[in-house]
Amino acid sequence: MDASKEEKIRQASDLVRKHKLVEKDMLTYLALQDDNIPLKDMDQQLKEMDQDYEVMLMERIESKKQLEAKFQDIQRKI
């Protein structure tokens, strides 16, 4: 392995250890990465899960509001 590649690898490992690896640091590695088909398939699932989570969260908030309104109505009657 040539010295400049070894130096780049060492610098990259230093960045990872310091948690300072950013997108611009990964540009030299993009050509070396393989397409990960299962992960690409999982992207759609993650988007669907995120949408479902948002719907559940909004429904939960709405249910809390309705329940609070019901309690306030009962409290006024008492």
Image: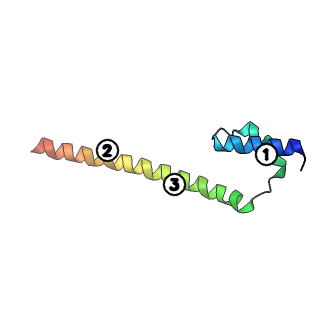
Q: Residue furthest left?
A: 78
Describe the element under mark 3 as helix, strand or loop. Answer: helix
Q: Quadrant of residue 14?
A: top right
Instruction: Give 65 or 57, whichever is nearer the viewer.
Output: 57
First along the sequence among labels 2 and 3 = 3
- Mark 2 is on which residue type? Lys
Q: Residue furthest front?
A: 3
- Mark 3 is on which residue type? Asp
Residue tagged 1: 9
Describe the element under mark 1 as helix, strand or loop. Answer: helix
**Camera-nearest label, 3 or 1:** 1
Instruction: Give 17 or 72, whichever is nearer the viewer.
Output: 17
Residue tagged 3: 52
First along the sequence among labels 1 and 2 = 1
Q: Badge 2: few (under 14), some or many (20 or more) residues near its Cα, within 10 Å?
A: few
Describe the element under mark 2 as helix, strand or loop. Answer: helix
Considering the image in quadrants, where does the C terminus appear?
top left
Determine whether 58 is above or below 35 in the image: above
Residue tagged 2: 65
First along the sequence among labels 3 and 1 = 1
Taking the image as shown, residue 22 lies to the left or right of residue 71, namely: right
Q: Which residue is depicted at the point 60% across and 55% down? A: 46
Q: Residue furthest bottom?
A: 38
Counting from the top left corner in percent of width and height, residue 25 is at: 75, 39
Asked if labels 2 and 1 touch by Cβ distance under 8 angstroms, the answer is no
Q: Which residue is depicted at the point 75% across and 59% down? A: 36
Asked if labels 1 and 3 touch by Cβ distance under 8 angstroms, the answer is no
| Real-space Cα separation, disc 3 to disc 1, in angstroms | 41 Å
Counting from the top left corner in percent of width and height, residue 61 is at: 37, 46
Instruction: Give 77 or 47, whichever is nearer the viewer.
Output: 47
- Mark 1 is on which residue type? Ile
